[in-house]
Image (tube, rainbow, N blue to C red):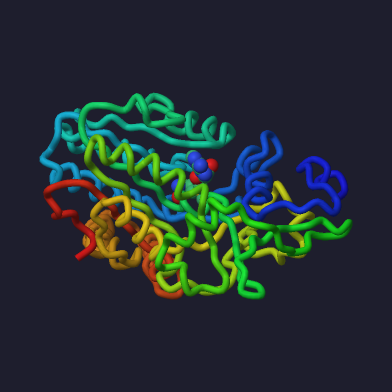
């Protein structure tokens, strides 16, 4: 443990803010979780919808094509996947788009990924496609733009604040020589002012504030405002704030107790639940239209996932059918991902007929 503490530059008795700590744990070059380890799949630490079932990705492909139609079938249509992970979703999208030649000829497809390690994995998987990796959006021009991300937002570090003696304080960690203890720090005035500008956060005693995530979304909103289009985010989260920490530390598909955080630092994922009401308010404040937030179950069913499964079933043997039913129920069941995962779409367009939300 001493070694890992030194590597991550965590100094005894020096306070570190929650988001700074998570940033180091996930993205410190060479040793951060997303810079050195394959997180996805059965042998990884967690599974995501695109790594569970191709059906999920096919439905996203259909949603993207229907959105292109709603936007008037533009000749240039920019598409950006946010945080593509192991590239599973994009792989199915590329394959599905080939069945729709007019659409396919219009698409300019970009991948926005922070981790160099995952970029290498994506490039290997998507070898031979004409996808482009980007670090910012400035060279994307021409037609409208659609951003989409599955479990993108939950992977971005958050800040935490709490009220003590009527004062809003920021949560920090301090290394006491054995483990990380929770403590308090004086918040920056600009952070306090920003979070106080959100109605949804006003009455809370414990606040999770995705400063970095909203920074990412601000760049996205700016691009949507100049080109038109929208952003679709799918993630696990809530509508009613919980007044408690939602940070989870996950390894080998299990949650790890936060007391053991330092032991597994760099080898465990750290995520938090997404506050969809906050995202809603954020997009509205930025003057984008927002579709009502729906559950993953609602969205996938509205987009025809059951009908698609019935078509595929006809060509399957019993073993394949069984597998498809199991994975489909993981995506849709209330007790699994169906309700906890939610979908939000914020957009700028005169036509409001986007599918999946009504
Ligand atoms: C939880 S994974 C989800 C991966 C994939 N979308 C899936 O559903 O399987 C989060 C992804 O977002 C990327 N990511 C996190 N923060 C990012 C940022 N600020 N900019 C770009 N990519 C980021 C991670 O490196 C990773 O690829």
In the image shown, does 208 or 330 lie closer to the viewer? 208
- Examine the rendered structure and indicate whether residue 98 appears above or below residue 264: above
**Residue lying at 17% horizontally and 46% vertically, measured from the top left:** 349
- Examine the rendered structure and indicate whether residue 230 appears above or below residue 204: above
Q: Is residue 151 left or right of residue 157?
A: left
In the image shown, does 50 or 6 lie closer to the viewer? 6
Q: Position of residue 13 (x, y in %)?
A: 84, 54
Q: Quadrant of residue 55?
A: bottom left
Q: Quadrant of residue 303?
A: bottom left
- Examine the rendered structure and indicate whether residue 252 appears above or below residue 167: above
- Examine the rendered structure and indicate whether residue 99 appears above or below residue 256: above
**Residue lying at 18% horizontally and 42% vertically, measured from the top left:** 68
Q: Position of residue 327 (x, y in %)?
A: 42, 62
**Residue lying at 85% horizontally and 44% vertically, measured from the top left:** 3
Q: Position of residue 84 (x, y in %)?
A: 45, 41
Q: Is residue 231 left or right of residue 86?
A: left
- Does residue 162 appear anywhere in the picture? yes
């Amino acid at each position: 443990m001493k070694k890992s503490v030194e590597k991550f530059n965590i100094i005894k008795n020096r306070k570190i803010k929650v988001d700074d700590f998570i940033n180091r744990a996930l993205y410190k070059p060479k040793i951060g979780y997303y810079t050195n380890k394959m997180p996805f799949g059965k042998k990884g630490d967690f599974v995501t919808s695109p790594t569970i079932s191709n059906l999920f990705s096919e439905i996203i492909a259909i949603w993207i094509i229907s959105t292109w139609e709603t936007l008037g079938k533009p000749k240039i249509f920019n598409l950006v996947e946010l945080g593509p992970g192991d590239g599973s979703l994009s792989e199915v999208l590329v394959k599905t788009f080939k069945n729709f030649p007019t659409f396919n000829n219009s698409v300019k497809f970009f991948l926005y990924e922070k981790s160099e390690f995952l970029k290498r994995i994506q490039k290997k998987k998507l070898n031979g496609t004409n996808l482009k990796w980007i670090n910012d959006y400035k060279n994307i021009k021409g037609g409208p733009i659609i951003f989409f991300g599955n479990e993108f937002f939950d992977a971005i570090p958050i800040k935490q604040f709490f009220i003590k003696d009527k004062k809003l304080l920021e949560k920090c960690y301090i290394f006491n020589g054995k483990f990380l203890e929770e403590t308090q720090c004086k918040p920056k005035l600009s952070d306090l002012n920003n979070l106080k500008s959100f109605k949804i956060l006003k009455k809370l005693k414990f606040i999770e504030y995705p400063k970095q995530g909203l920074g990412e979304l601000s760049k996205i909103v700016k691009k949507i405002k100049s080109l038109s289009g929208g952003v679709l985010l799918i993630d696990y989260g809530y509508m009613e704030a919980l007044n408690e920490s939602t940070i989870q530390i996950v390894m080998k598909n299990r949650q790890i107790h936060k007391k053991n955080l330092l032991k597994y630092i760099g080898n465990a994922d750290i995520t938090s639940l997404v506050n969809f009401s906050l995202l809603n308010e954020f997009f509205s404040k930025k003057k984008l239209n927002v579709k009502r937030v729906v559950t993953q179950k609602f969205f996938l069913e509205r987009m025809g996932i059951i009908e698609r499964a019935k078509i595929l079933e006809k060509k399957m043997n019993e073993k394949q059918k069984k597998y498809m039913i199991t994975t489909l129920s993981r995506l849709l069941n209330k007790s699994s991902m169906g309700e906890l995962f939610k979908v939000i779409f914020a957009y700028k367009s005169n036509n409001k007929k986007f599918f999946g939300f009504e």
